[in-house]
Image: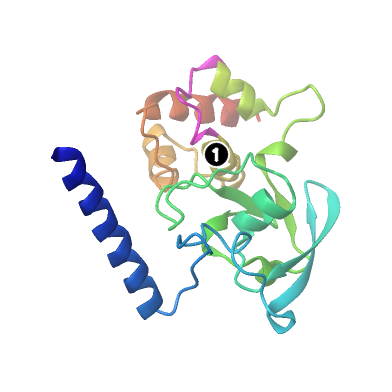
């Protein structure tokens, strides 16, 4: 009896979601599911496509993308750079932080087409061969990570925090790193890693 009720409830939910989606004018995949990103949706018409050229980690890169593609999806799905993480996809967690022309940016909140000709640095571009960036090494030295999911964004934001000169005290570091969330609660060690790196810079 309970299995029958569960199946009925699931069908009602699916029907409701599908009907709501159609009413909102959003596209459904043949399976009846919503696309998870612009890359899995029905290909965009030619007038909604743009060729984006930018320098990523010192290398010239070009991709043709739907005009609605975020910088995050460009990096992960078109340029095969999965180090930048998709967390909340709403600009609230900082997991997708990258440097654009040396300024930290939430890659999920900005469109790829807005950065034509820009210089983008992702976590993959910090190390020099086998030599880690000093802040990457400091994160290891101070155990500034647990699950590691937020770490790329934390490191990129930390690099910018140091470059911006916001490392006068632990309180200042906390304030300027407050846009990057860590579910594991490694904040104290993250601050220590940034503090050490700033002193050695």
Q: Is residue 102 among what the camera can see?
A: no
Residues drawn in magenta: 141-151
Of residues 199 and 147, the one drawn nearer to the viewer in this rendering: 147
Instruction: Residue 164 in the image: state x and y as whole percent.
Output: 57, 48
- The residue that mark 1 highlights is 158
Of residues 24 and 130, the one drawn nearer to the viewer in this rendering: 24
Left or right of residue 22, residue 194 in this image? right
Mark 1 element type? helix
Instruction: Residue 47 in the image: state x and y as whole percent.
Output: 72, 84
Give the main secondary structure, helix, strand or loop, of the magenta stretch. Answer: loop
Residue under the point 57% across and 18% down: 140
Quarter occupied by the N terminus: top left
Residue under the point 50% across and 59% down: 31
Is the residue 58 above or below the residue 91 in the image? above
> Is 150 within the magenta?
yes
Total residue callouts: 1
Residue under the point 66% across and 75% down: 44
Of residues 68 and 157, the one drawn nearer to the viewer in this rendering: 68
Left or right of residue 154, residue 24 in this image? left
Left or right of residue 44, residue 155 in this image? left
Is the residue 150 above or below the residue 9 in the image? above
Kindly give the residue lying farthest to the left in the view shown. 1
- Res 64 → quadrant: bottom right
Left or right of residue 106, residue 45 in this image? right
């Amino acid at each position: 009896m309970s299995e029958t009720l569960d199946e009925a409830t699931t069908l009602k939910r699916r029907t409701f979601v599908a009907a709501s989606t159609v009413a909102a004018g959003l596209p459904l995949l043949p399976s009846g599911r919503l696309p998870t990103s612009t890359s899995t949706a029905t290909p965009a018409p030619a007038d909604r496509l743009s060729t984006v050229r930018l320098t990523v980690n010192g290398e010239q890169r070009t991709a043709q993308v739907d005009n609605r593609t975020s910088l995050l999806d460009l990096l992960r799905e078109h340029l095969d750079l999965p180090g930048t993480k998709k967390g909340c996809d709403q600009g609230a967690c900082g997991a997708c932080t990258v440097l654009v022309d040396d300024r930290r940016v939430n890659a999920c909140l900005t469109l790829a087409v807005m950065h034509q000709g820009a210089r983008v640095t992702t976590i993959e571009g910090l190390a020099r061969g086998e030599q880690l960036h000093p802040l990457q090494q400091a994160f290891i030295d101070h155990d500034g990570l647990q699950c590691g999911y937020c770490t790329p964004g934390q490191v990129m934001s930390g690099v910018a925090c140091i470059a911006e000169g916001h490392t006068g005290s632990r309180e200042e570091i906390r304030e300027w790193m407050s846009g990057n969330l860590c579910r594991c609660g490694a904040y104290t060690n993250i601050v220590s890693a940034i503090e050490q790196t700033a002193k050695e810079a």
